[in-house]
Image (cartoon, grey):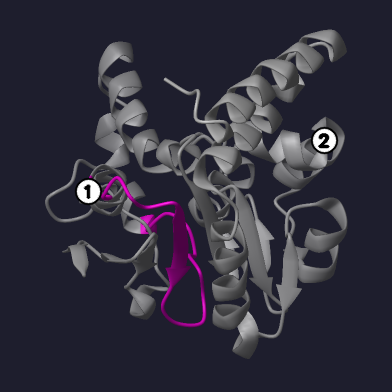
Amino acid sequence: MTLLDKDGVHVTAEGEVATVTLTNPARRNAQTPATWRALAEAGRVLPGLIRVVVLRAEGKSFSAGLDRRAFEPEGIEGELSFLDLARRTDAELDAAVAEYQQAFTWWRRPDLVSIAAVQGHAIGAGFQLALACDLRVCAHDVQFAMRETSLGLVPDLAGTHPLVGLVGYARALEICATGRFVHADEAERVGLANLVVDAAQLEGAVTDLAAALLASPRDAVIETKALLAGAGARSYDEQRAAERAAQARRLRDLAGLGE
């Protein structure tokens, strides 16, 4: 079932799995504000029964990042040039970037598990989109890079928090400040990639992972995700208490005593 098809973003649902596909391979799935609006809308149109969301891209590249036309004086047709955006007030500029970030923030919703299937280039905004997901399955040809700092900018699409969480502050700083490529072997070693496979096996590996995620009861996965997502902000004793509370809810639910 097709849920959305606009501005280079195609969303389908089958059973408990939704698939969000970037569909502009001719431009290596370069992203524009229209792409971001469509990606934000993708999160809003998902049926309530969806448990797993797969993010994939057509062509050889996952996403080459921001469409550079956004920095040209004439900008992208129908969109405000970033050069013009820079001349807006602080409040207007902040609101614009906050709107762009909405495309990157819903992928870690507590009721979903999201998987990015990443091949080829995942640069800048493409890297941050892959980081937005809970899990990443990568082809051997993957090339991650955070090029914003090299261009005089900063990563501002909600990618810095998950990057530091995955690889630590020092490595995240080095990756961002140098803008270098992170290839598949390093991505797997440092925790950016959950799994690395041949490009021909990427779709099958993601399908298998989705099936494994669906094998456990939904509420148990939701509770476990919440426990793990909040662990970094809790003390050891607070985490133990959170585990006890979550387990009590699960036991009562299994015993038919839930609300």
Q: CA distance from mark 2 to mark 1?
A: 34 Å
Give the residue at mark 2: 168
- Dominant SS of magenta comes to loop
Quadrant housing residue 115:
bottom right
What amino acid type should be assigned to the residue bearing mark 2?
Gly
Determine if the magenta segment contains residue 60: yes
Looking at the rendered structure, which numbered label has been put on residue 45?
1
The quarter in which the C terminus is drawn is top left
| Residues packed near mark 2 inside 10 Å, few (<14), some (14 to 19) or many (20 plus) | some
Between residue 152 and residue 207, name the one nearer to us. 207
Q: Position of residue 68 (x, y in %)?
A: 39, 57
Tags 2 and 1 touching, CB below 8 Å: no
Query: Residue 184, can we see it?
Result: yes
Q: Give the percent coordinates (x, y) of residue 1.
A: 21, 70
In percent of width and height, residue 236 lies at 86, 14
The answer to which quarter of the image holds residue 201 is bottom right
Q: Residue at x 56, y 68 (%)?
A: 211
Q: Inspect the magenta stretch and tell me whether residue 185 lies in it.
A: no
Helix, strand or loop for disc 2: loop
Residue extent of the magenta highlight: 45-68
Residue sticking out furthest to the left: 78
